[in-house]
Image (cartoon, rainbow, N blue to C red):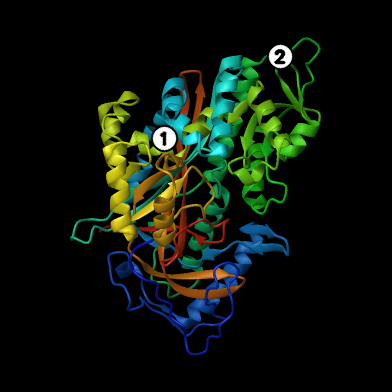
């Protein structure tokens, strides 16, 4: 989501223009100064101290070296590269950080309880699914497994709830507004931890940053995510005892990945931590490889692949239609969903993560069906305005009319994950005007979040870009359940992504932003 103000770039006298890899941004081969940039003065930017030019160049050299030496990397077609990062952490209000990290258990409990309500999910997703084939297939998979009889009652959620700071511009404090909650393939936990380490190193190592490492909050999602997978695997072993003659079975966790995976280091850090903590190996396979090689015993429905019995299926793919090239991938997904392995996530959790369910949960009185009044109040305090589309109600008609009158105040969101799917401004207006009313049920409408911009230093391709940026903070939660009961609910870390203030999206993998970390301040 973007702020209403336009971007501001500072092009320094000795800089040269070169095209950016995804956004056509202006990169700097060297820099002469980095100040608070006169364009926007607000609460966040006022906490960004001036950095001398000599310090910036030292940060670039040392930052690139540290990132390469510590696995803060991505895999491109051209080879291994340092991941897009910010060289300096972004100021973030301490009370808001405490507020959103305190919501992790509330959202864990909510997501799990909604996932158990078959009637609720079907009631609210059936109409949206009529105009969204991907959502339709996911919902049908959820219903297929339920009607057949769910073989594995346990489930694992590695959830990430994303927030932006909202500035009401009336003198009131900045408040968090939830962008979305991710229930499948919640990525960048490992690289986020590495960015926290990078910033801690640079602040301590390079004089003149004007920042204090004591204000960097702890961040350890690598071990935390691995604990979730490891504890789920142990739960599987406890509830799926060794069969006669199977004393030598080899247990493994399956990572379902994309064939040309660029974010492999983010996954490998978790894989290696899982081995260090639990001595559980990981098997990696695409959906097509699962269908070709995995065996499902129709009696026990135990899943085996590459000589291992799969205890947990961790989806790092399967969240977008692009991952399903044909029926082969859907057959693989069905095989996995029917198996005795614990799914992370199940089709039920994936359905709960849809934009439509997010919108429905924001309606008056709905949260209270699943959580206590106190938890509902805490959760509702983070919601932005969310509106149904195309259901024929007066509310949806009014929302559509409001968006047509003031499109800069809204975003139209389909049932998609992964970045780059939302519709803004003229694209939104065109869709609202040309779609049949019932077709709009595939979308929800959301208020634009007015995020305060602040100066940032982005590092891409070993070049420094000085921009005004806005940020999005994600909180990672582990939710392990056994049937109705949540047996583990834990906050395990955070992710901060920054983007140029003019960009409408923040997805790093999609090329819109960079990895960052928060440095806390007291307003």
Element under label 1? helix
Question: Disc number at residue 490?
Answer: none
The residue singled out by tag 1 in the image is 357
Viewer can see residue 146: yes
In the image, taking residue 240 as reference, residue 116 lies left or right, namely left
The span from disc 1 to disc 2 (Cα, nearest Å) is 33 Å
Q: Quadrant of the C terminus?
A: bottom left
Residue 279 in the image: above or below residue 240: below
Residue under the point 56% across and 25% down = 142
Position in image of residue 274 (x %, y %): 64, 38
In the image, taking residue 521 as reference, residue 420 lies left or right, namely right
In the image, taking residue 40 as reference, residue 18 lies left or right, namely right
Residue under the point 23% across and 55% down = 173
Q: Residue furthest bottom?
A: 13
Position in image of residue 58 (x %, y %): 54, 76
Q: Quadrant of the N terminus?
A: bottom left
Position in image of residue 212 (x %, y %): 39, 64
Disc 2 packing (10 Å; few <14; some 14–19; many ≥20) = few
Residue under the point 63% across and 26% down = 337
The residue singled out by tag 2 in the image is 300
- Is 105 or 500 nearer to us in this picture? 500
- The mark closer to the camera, 1 or 2, is 1
Element under label 2? loop
Viewer can see residue 104: no
Question: What is the count of numbered marks?
Answer: 2
Q: Residue furthest top?
A: 244
Position in image of residue 447 (x %, y %): 32, 51
Disc 1 packing (10 Å; few <14; some 14–19; many ≥20) = some
Marked residue nearer the N-terminal end (1 or 2) = 2
Residue under the point 32% across and 79% down = 38
In the image, taking residue 27 as reference, residue 500 lies left or right, namely left
- Is 396 or 173 nearer to us in this picture? 396
């Amino acid at each position: 989501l973007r702020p209403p103000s336009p971007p501001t770039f500072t092009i320094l006298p000795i800089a040269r223009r070169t095209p950016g890899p995804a956004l056509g941004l202006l990169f700097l081969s060297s820099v002469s100064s980095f100040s608070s940039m006169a364009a926007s003065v607000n609460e966040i930017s006022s906490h960004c101290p001036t950095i001398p030019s000599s310090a910036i160049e030292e940060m670039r050299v040392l930052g690139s070296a540290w990132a390469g030496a510590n696995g803060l990397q991505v895999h491109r077609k051209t080879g291994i590269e340092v991941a897009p990062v910010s060289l300096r952490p972004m100021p973030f209000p301490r009370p808001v950080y405490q507020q959103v990290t305190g919501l992790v258990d509330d959202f864990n409990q909510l997501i799990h309880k909604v996932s158990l309500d078959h009637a609720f999910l079907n009631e609210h997703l059936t109409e949206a699914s009529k105009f969204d084939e991907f959502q339709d297939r996911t919902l049908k998979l959820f219903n297929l497994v339920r009607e057949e009889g769910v073989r594995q009652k346990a489930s694992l959620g590695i959830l990430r709830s994303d927030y932006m700071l909202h500035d009401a511009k009336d003198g009131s404090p900045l408040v968090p507004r939830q962008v979305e909650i991710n229930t499948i393939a919640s990525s960048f936990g490992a690289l986020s931890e590495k960015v926290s380490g990078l910033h801690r190193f640079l602040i301590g190592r390079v004089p003149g940053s004007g920042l204090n490492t004591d204000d960097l909050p702890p961040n350890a999602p690598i071990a935390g995510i691995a604990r979730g997978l490891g504890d789920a695997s142990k739960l599987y072993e406890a509830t799926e005892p060794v069969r006669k003659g199977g004393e030598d079975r080899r247990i493994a966790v399956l990572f379902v990945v994309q064939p040309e995976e660029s974010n492999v280091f983010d996954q490998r850090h978790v894989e290696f931590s899982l081995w260090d903590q639990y001595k559980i190996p990981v098997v990696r396979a695409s959906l097509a490889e699962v269908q070709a090689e995995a065996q499902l015993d129709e009696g026990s429905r135990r899943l085996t692949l590459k000589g291992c019995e799969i205890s947990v299926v961790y989806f790092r793919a399967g969240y977008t239609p692009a991952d399903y090239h044909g029926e082969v991938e859907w057959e693989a997904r069905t095989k996995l969903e029917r198996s005795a392995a614990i799914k992370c996530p199940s089709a039920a959790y994936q359905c709960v993560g849809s934009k439509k369910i997010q919108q429905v949960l924001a309606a008056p009185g709905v949260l209270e069906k699943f959580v206590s009044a106190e938890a509902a109040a805490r959760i509702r305090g983070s919601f932005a305005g969310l509106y149904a589309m195309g259901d024929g109600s007066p509310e949806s008609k009014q929302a559509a009319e409001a968006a047509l009158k003031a499109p800069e105040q809204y975003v139209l969101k389909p049932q998609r994950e992964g970045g780059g799917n939302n519709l803004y401004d003229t694209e939104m207006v065109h869709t609202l005007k040309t779609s049949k009313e019932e077709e709009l049920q595939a979308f929800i409408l959301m208020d634009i979040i007015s995020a305060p911009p602040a100066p940032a230093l982005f590092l891409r391709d070993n070049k420094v870009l000085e921009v005004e940026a806005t940020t999005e903070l994600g909180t990672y939660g582990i939710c392990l359940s056994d049937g109705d009961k949540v047996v583990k609910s834990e906050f395990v870390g955070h992710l901060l992504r920054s983007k140029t203030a003019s960009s409408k999206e923040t997805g790093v993998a999609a090329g819109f932003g960079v990895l960052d970390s928060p440095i806390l301040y007291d307003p």
